[in-house]
Image: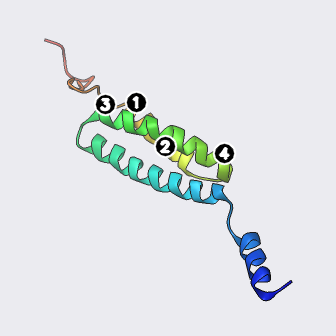
Amino acid sequence: MNRLTSIAVLLLVAAPPASAFQHSDNATSWKTTEAAGNKAAQEAHFDEAERLLTTNLAVAENIAKTVGPEDDRLPATLFDLAQRSIMPKEGTRKRSPFTSAR
């Protein structure tokens, strides 16, 4: 084997699999969507927050399939969705249980 062939073989063996690049893209997408969903919730755009976080759930599930159960994005997304589920719907005001209805 000549030197050029040896280097080419070494590069092919050492190159990361295509799934590693896909995981990186998914991780970037997850982080961006997570930030947008949390910002929408903070600004009381609850329907938009729910849409973004639900989209993010699919991304987190795909990452968990690739990385494994030790990845913390899926539980983080489920936690964010759980928080969203206790927020009022857009256009409604949350009434305190301690105030009387008039």
- Upstream in the sequence, badge 3 or badge 1? 3
**Residue 65 has which mark?**
4
Identify the residue shown where x is 54% and y is 49%: 73
Q: Residue 47 got which mark? A: 3
Left or right relative to 16: residue 78: left
User: Eyeballing the image, is 10 above or below 24?
Assistant: below
- Label 1: which residue? 85
User: In front of the other: label 4 or label 2?
Assistant: 4
Q: Marks 4 and 3: CB-CB under 8 Å?
A: no
- Residue 69: tell me if it is visible: no
Q: Amino acid at mark 3?
A: Asp
Q: Residue furthest left?
A: 102
Give the quadrant of residue 52. top left
User: Mark 4 Cα within 10 Å, few/some/many (few <14, many 20+)?
Assistant: few
Q: Amino acid at mark 2?
A: Thr
Q: Amino acid at mark 1?
A: Ser
For disc 1, the neighbor class at 10 Å (few under 14, some 14 to 19, many from 20) is: few
Disc 2/disc 3 C-alpha distance (Å)? 16 Å
For marks 1 and 2, the one nearer the N-term is: 2
